[in-house]
Amino acid sequence: MRIICTVECDSSDYVNAGCLSQPDDSGVLHPVAFFSRKLIPAECNYDIYDKELMAIVRAFEEWRAELEGTEIPVEVISDHKNLQHFMTTKRLSRRQARWSEFLSRFNFKLIYRPGAQGGKPDALTRRSSDLPQGDDDERQEHQNQIVLKPENLSPDMLPVSLNQAEIDPNDQVVQKPIEDLISIAYENDTVSSKVLEALKNRDSIDPPELKEVKLPRALLSEKHQRLYFKDRLYIPEDEELRLHLLRSSHDSAAAGHPGKAKTYELLSRHYYWPKMSRDVKRYVRNCHICSRSKASRLSYQGLLEPLKTPFTKWEDIAVDFIVDLPRSKNETTGQVCRNIMVVTDRLSKQRHFIGCGSIEARYAARLFLHHVWKHHGLPKTIVSDRGTQFTSRLWQRLCQRLRISLKLSTAYHPETDGQSENSNQGLEQYLRAYVNYVQDDWVNWLPLAEFAINNHRSETNGVSPFYAVYGQHPRLGNEPSEGVRKLPQKQQLDVAAADRFAEWMTKLTENLRNEMDMAQSQHAEQANKFRCSAPQFKQGDKVWLDTRNLSMDRPSKKLSDKYIGPFEIIEVVGPATCRLDLPPSMKIHNVFHTNLLRSASTDPFPGQDQPMRTHVKMEQDNNSREWMVEKVLNSRITKNRYGKIRLEYFVKWKGYPPSWRPQRDLIPGSEALLYTFHDQNPDRPSPSELWRRRSS
């Protein structure tokens, strides 16, 4: 036989099928013969590999006379790619060995084709007359069996409740059999009983109870003493039953805590009751696990509200610190610095960069006196973050005595002190360009960094800080040789000229204020395009707190809760800030921007569980209070999450319980206490021992 023959085979769970085709003169395949054969019950239990191979065997048996002895290999097309390696497989089952011996009589080659392209044999496997017609079909008897019976399970494998604190993914959440709950609900519900009776008797007059169901009679049906609406089981008004169904469609591990729409879709596949969508929404919005674990998809909450524009230069300033830099020695004073104090005038944008070793409140006040006050006088307001320098009693008392208004940002809201944040970024960018490889000379670049940044034109007011403060630009050294033209002696002594200069400086300051107002308005308008108005919280409301800026004690940030709470609002501080009633263990400032808060629902579905996360603790936050060390109690050497060893001290705090803290947190101002501890406890781990371990 010189004509190429093509055999297309396919198999489903219950049918084998094939199609024999031959090409015409133009190469187009035309079907010559078809076959399909139902599988017997034993064959239905074969795995898919054997079923696909069996379809090929059955095709060669069907067309043995046409396919045996061909000179040109028969092309056998299958959608099971692993069959291409069948003829080279070494270990075969007895059944496969018999099939291999039979197929060796034919000259053929296997070709893989995706199932979506196999229309003809696939259609033959899907004929409704060949598929099981019901649960009593003998081909399904062996598939509907219980593998593990109740007597095969030990007591510790019995179903557990969802309400427990920790859930094992392998647990099956089962409370009371659903059929029992449905039966009880139908027995106690007179409405569904009356409607079922009317449907059975085919009464022409609708019973009054049908109005309570609020469903058109034409869409109702009765099956097995149950009422169905559009082939969905009607659930009577039974809170326990509805709660059970809501839990199984939302809380269970198989459901996965979906949102409102997906929970409703899962539930509505099989069940219906009036106002089911309302109950689903109520249940989901009151789910504490969803509220804690799901990220918010809302726009930034709270419109940008710029601070009031200062009236004069150096009247309103911003102060911040850049901390934990590499040690750098000042070549002029010999001081070793690790931090930078950044002071910025909000009107002229003039900045001062001050290298320092300690950032304690007492030392920060001294730096402010020596480097800022002597040049510009006393400010009226200071804007800063909630660093320990500015929340300390010393700094607050100093500002109170000098009648300086201290404006602290809310917790984790850097937009309040955006001026300092921009100054920090500009300085860090400058230092990255000029410091040496080991980064130990940055303090000696601060004078030139301050000069360069103060000589750059500000995008806010259009002039450089030098020009805004002094009315002229400083010399860079690259000016023309003739220099700046000097005024004649007569003009220098002209009082009118001095008046004109004073008037010009006044207009310059006014222009700075106008430009700053305009820039802030434009910035606020642009920023508010991507924000929405702050929610109108009120005292007594319950809210969830965003954990993005909080240090949790759990191993992975990605698997930790997105929100904690809910907490009660005890005061609405401003249009976009609220004070929360936090537990004493959370030692952080309790005023937060509304963007970090999310409203908590307080109308749970009757009987709905709202488990609290009892094992969530907060690590101590050193940026919210000035912690005073009273005594060092112990020391140890441990490893951090990256495997690096570090020295920790067990410290007794003034006003707070003792805790373990890394050595770096205790260096400023605590040297004397550390020396005393090691003198009295020479056997405890010390910095020298830490150094030896790291060197070994």
Image (tube, rainbow, N blue to C red):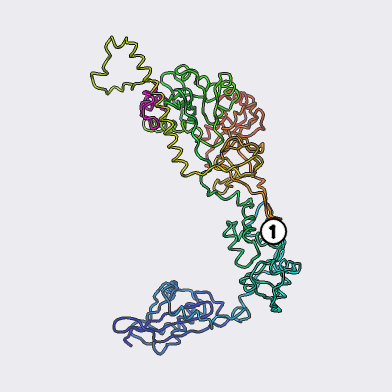
Residue, x 43% and y 27% (percent of image)? 513
What residue occupies the far right of the structure in this picture? 188
362 sits to left or right of 583: left
* Nearer to me, 382 or 38: 382
Label 1 packing within 10 angstroms: few (<14), some (14-19), many (20+): some
Q: Quadrant of the N terminus?
A: bottom left
Q: Main secondary structure of the magenta part?
A: helix
In the image, residue 211 above or below residue 467:
below
* Nearer to me, 465 or 509: 509
Across and down, in percent, residue 334 comes to 44, 19
Q: Residue 596 lies in magenta, yes or no?
A: no
Across and down, in percent, residue 199 comes to 69, 76
> What span is in magenta?
440-469
Residue of label 1 = 160
Across and down, in percent, residue 93 comes to 51, 77
What residue occupies the far bottom of the structure in this picture? 65
Across and down, in percent, residue 239 comes to 71, 60
* Nearer to me, 552 or 469: 469
Q: Is residue 129 visible?
A: yes
In the image, residue 388 above or below residue 523:
above
| Quarter-of-image position of residue 522 | top left
333 sits to left or right of 650: left
Q: Amino acid at mark 1?
A: Val
Q: Is residue 696 visible?
A: no
Check disc 1 and report its element: helix, strand or loop. Answer: loop
Q: Residue 456 lies in magenta, yes or no?
A: yes
